[in-house]
């Protein structure tokens, strides 16, 4: 530690490098799945299959694609920690910012999904009781 900077040691750099490589690996599958899902959704929409899941598949594909791209960005930010000297803490904060962005997206998507599932459950109970009573 000199000039007020901190450098991770070799063991710490190996841990960060391993994380970065695994994140890149996962991101490629997210992007591939996103592209395939979005294409499948577009094809279904072009065939007029909106109600059969075309729109949902397109949205899911786009979300996977965005998640994959943001995962690559976070992986590259972690890679910078290993590849550069003198900026480890600054690069770590940048990498954490990328992860925060990725997990903020996932947080909101899960929250929205839970809300929709709760609404669907309530409507099923209400209309199920109404249909059973008539």
Image (spheres, rainbow, N blue to C red):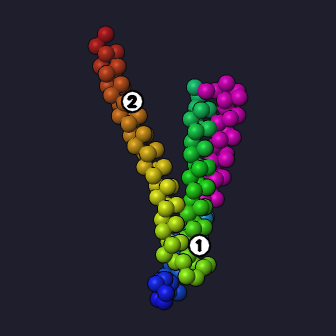
Name the side, left or right, on which 115 lies relative to 81. Answer: left
Mark 2 surroundings within 10 Å by alpha-carbon count, few (fewer than 14), some (14 through 19), many (20 or more): few
According to the picture, the residue beneath numbered tag 2 turns out to be 120
Q: Is residue 132 above or below residue 3?
A: above
**What type of secondary structure mainly makes up the magenta span?**
helix
Instruction: Identify the residue shown where x is 63% and y is 43%.
Output: 37
Total marks placed: 2
Along the line of sight, which residue is nearer the eye, 39 or 75?
75
| Magenta span contains residue 46 | yes
Relative height, residue 85 to residue 93 (above, below): below
Please state the horizontal and vertical placement of residue 23, each as a whole percent of the image: 56, 65
Who is closer to the viewer here, 69 or 97? 97
Q: Is residue 26 visible?
A: no
What range of the chain is rendered magenta?
26-50
The residue drawn where x is 59% and y is 32% is 55
> Which one is earlier in the sequence, the residue at label 2 or at label 1?
1
Q: Secondary structure at mark 1?
A: helix
Q: Is residue 50 above or below residue 26?
A: above
Label 1 crowd bin: few (<14), some (14–19), many (20+), radius 10 Å: many
- Element assignment for label 2: helix
Q: Which residue is mark 1?
A: 79
């Amino acid at each position: 530690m000199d000039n007020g900077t901190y450098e991770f040691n070799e063991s710490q750099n190996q841990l960060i490098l391993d994380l970065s490589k695994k994140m890149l690996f996962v991101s490629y599958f997210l992007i591939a799945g996103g592209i395939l899902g979005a294409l499948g959704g577009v094809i279904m929409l072009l065939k007029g299959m909106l109600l059969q899941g075309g729109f949902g598949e397109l949205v899911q594909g786009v979300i996977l694609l965005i998640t994959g791209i943001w995962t690559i960005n976070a992986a590259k930010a972690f890679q910078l920690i290993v590849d550069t000297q003198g900026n480890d803490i600054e690069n770590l904060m940048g990498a954490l910012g990328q992860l925060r962005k990725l997990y903020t997206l996932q947080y909101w998507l899960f929250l929205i999904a839970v809300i929709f599932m709760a609404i669907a459950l309530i409507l099923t109970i209400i209309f199920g009781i109404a249909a059973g009573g008539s």
